[in-house]
Image (tube, grey):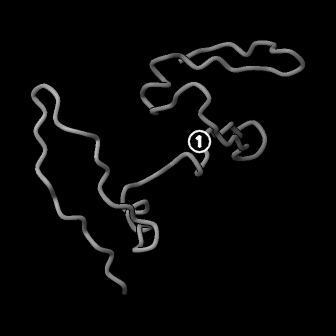
Amino acid sequence: MKTKISRWGNSYALRLPKALMSDFHLQKDTVVTMSKVGLGKTSFIKIVPHPENQYDLATMLAGITDVNIHGAVDWGSDVGREQWAYVKPMTHKKK
């Protein structure tokens, strides 16, 4: 894939094609980390999403405790074809 480096104020910008953004699940304003890899003529630029933007369900669920878990929220009665069954909230088991 070929692209062009352009001037953007006092800096330079590399335009990323939409297909590439989609392939790597990148969006506008995604924070990335850039680094130089290798030495001399064989070096290249490595661009990866910044780790702070990466979440995984297991890590987020591990952060739920009896202290920070909240109860069910009453959104009012069902509207239209909605139908919800009550599910007893799980309690965090201490290790």
Q: Is residue 85 above or below residue 14?
A: below
Q: x, y percentage for residue 74?
A: 28, 47
Q: Nearer the viewer, residue 53 or 45?
A: 53
Q: Residue at x 62, y 38 (%)?
A: 47
Q: Position of residue 69 (x, y in %)?
A: 40, 65
Residue at the extreme right of the image, as rendered:
10
Q: Residue furthest front?
A: 76
Task: Please tell me which residue is depicted at 46% across the width and 33% down the height of the picture.
Answer: 24
Return the residue found at the far bottom: 95
The residue depicted at 31 percent of the width and 80 percent of the height is 93
Q: Quadrant of residue 67?
A: bottom left
30, 45: nearer the viewer: 30
Residue 10 on image: x %, y %: 90, 19
Q: How many marks?
A: 1
Please give left or right for residue 19 compared with residue 30 in the image: left
Secondary structure under badge 1? strand
**Residue 62 located left or right of residue 82:** right
Residue type at tag 1: Val
Left or right of 51 in this view: 12: right
Locate the C terminus by quadrant: bottom left
Residue 4 location, quadrant: top right
Circle 1 residues within 10 Å: few <14, some 14–19, many ≥20? some
Above or below: residue 36 compared with residue 79 = below
Residue in front for this viewpoint, 74 or 87 = 74
Seen in the picture, residue 55 relative to 95 is either above or below; the reply is above
Residue to which mark 1 is pinned: 48
Q: Measured along the vertical axis of the image, is residue 78 above or below residue 54?
A: above
Q: Where residue 22 sits in the image (x, y, percent)?
A: 43, 25
